[in-house]
Image (tube, rainbow, N blue to C red):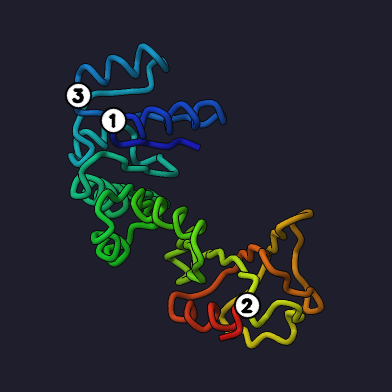
Amino acid sequence: MYIIVIGGGKVGYFLARALLDEGHEILVVEKSPARTEFISNELGSVCVRGDGCEVSTLTDAGTGRAEMFIAVTGEDEDNLVACQVAKHKFNVPRTVARINNPKNEAIFKELGIDVTVSSTNIIMESIQEEVPTHSLTHLLDIRDKGLEIVELKIPADAKTVGKEIRELSLPPESRLFLIIPGQGKPRVPTASTVIQAEDQIIAITTPESEEALRTALRGS
């Protein structure tokens, strides 16, 4: 794919390097002359100096043929504007934005950004995995379909431990598609699969069905 990355800081640099290693064609747009020179020296001719919020810069970057547009600057406002320009001016099919302030996530989603990544929320969810909690971890929002992929770990005291999936009152909009046991190989669940303590369940659901899914999986 041709992927444009806005922001050549540490996140943008390592993202660009990883995408190059996977064989993608990429271009990094960075405001700082020094940072632009550093990335060019390290990765080759894949970085240009410019403002990723400006139409002229994005035109020169060939945004019209980009298949994915990723904004990872340290400023939420810049990431939002850049993604908006890419989507509505250049019709880029997939936009991804880094969010530094979790309070801004709602407006990013409301304005049509396809995927948002909040470093703060990721860290908080990692912390929650280490303490007694039954909350869902958000893995990915599929905004254009109104769906999200979530993860929930079954605690030892859950009322669903020992029950088959067919016995659970799952909301109609939710599907379980992978179970990662505490020990053993991941498996695709069937109606007869038995829920065990420490199972990590990956599911797809709607935002409105989150609470119902959480209740169904923990049994309360």
Residue 157 placement (x, y as % from top left): 63, 76
Q: In the orientation shown, which residue stands out farthest toward the right?
A: 192
Direction from residue 5 to residue 31 in the image, left or right: left
Q: Is residue 131 above or below residue 23?
A: below
**Residue type indicated by callout 3:** Ser
Q: Quote the CA–CA distance across marks 2 and 1.
A: 49 Å
Residue at 37% from the left image edge and 50% from the top image edge: 95
Q: Which residue is mark 1?
A: 29
Mark 3 → mark 1, Cα distance in angstroms? 9 Å
Q: Residue at x 29, y 67 (%)?
A: 110
According to the picture, the residue beneath numbered tag 3 turns out to be 32
| Amino acid carrying mark 2 in the image | Ala
Q: What is the spatial separation of the Cα atoms under label 3 and label 2, in whole angstroms?
A: 52 Å
Quarter holding residue 201: bottom right
- Asked if residue 54 is positioned above or below residue 178 in the image, the reply reads above
Label 3 vs 2, first from the N-terminus: 3
Q: Disc 2 marks which residue?
A: 158
Q: Is residue 193 left or right of residue 35?
A: right
Mark on residue 167?
none
Q: Residue at x 75, y 69 (%)?
A: 189
How crowded is the residue under tag 3: few (<14 C-alpha within 10 Å), some, or many (20+)? some
